[in-house]
Image (cartoon, rainbow, N blue to C red):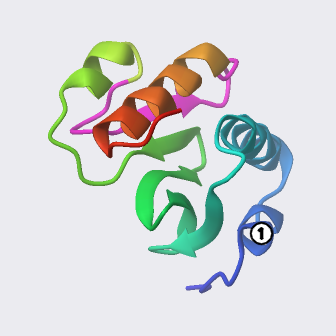
Amino acid sequence: MTHFKSVDEYVESFDGRAKERLLEMRQIIRTQLPNATERISYNIPAYFINGKLIIYFAAYKNHIGMYPGRTNSSAYNTIAARYAYGKSTVRFLHIEQLPKKLIQQFIKTRLKEVGIDS
């Protein structure tokens, strides 16, 4: 198993549609969280503000997964009911457009949950 040292290295390990989706997801997150620290955590891209985890994401063969880390909120499944997959996990299939507004709402919810004003 490869142990990634940076988000760039993680993204570059993919090709085709998965890589395109990773780049798109990364841009959405960076635009929404311009002051976040970007790093690899649990061997996938993660974004932190003031040491607080905001969001993870990862690519798979058929989808992009997005995860807020530990949460007690049921808001995630409400926000992304169509994409919900298990507790605090959403999946965006590669055959569909990334729902940018939904991802932004997901991030805003996470910021509120950890006590950071957006």
- Image point (76%, 61%), residue name: 11
Q: Amino acid at mark 1?
A: Ser
The answer to whether residue 81 shows anywhere in this view is no
Q: Position of residue 107 (x, y in %)?
A: 49, 33
The answer to whether residue 85 shows anywhere in this view is yes
14 to the left or right of 63: right
- Image point (48%, 42%), residue name: 66
Q: Secondary structure at mark 1?
A: loop
Which span is picked out in magenta?
A: 84-98
- Image point (71%, 76%), residue name: 6
Q: Position of residue 71 (x, y in %)?
A: 22, 45
Q: Which of 64 and 100 lies nearest the eye of the viewer? A: 100
4 is within the stretch colored magenta: no
Residue that protrudes farthest toward the left in the picture: 72
Q: Position of residue 48 (x, y in %)?
A: 52, 60
User: Quadrant of residue 24 in the image?
Assistant: top right
Q: Quadrant of the N terminus?
A: bottom right
Residue that protrudes farthest toward the front in the picture: 117
User: Quadrant of residue 40 in the image?
Assistant: bottom right
Q: Position of residue 58 (x, y in %)?
A: 56, 53
Compared to 79, does 38 lie above or below? below
Crowd class of label 1 (few under 14; some 14 to 19; many from 20; radius 10 Å): few
Compared to 9, does 28 lie above or below? above
- Image point (70%, 18%), residue name: 97
59 to the left or right of 82: right
Q: Which of 117 and 58 lies nearest the eye of the viewer? A: 117
Q: Which of 16 and 8 lies nearest the eye of the viewer? A: 8
Q: Main secondary structure of the magenta part?
A: loop
Q: How many marks?
A: 1
Residue corresponding to mark 1: 13
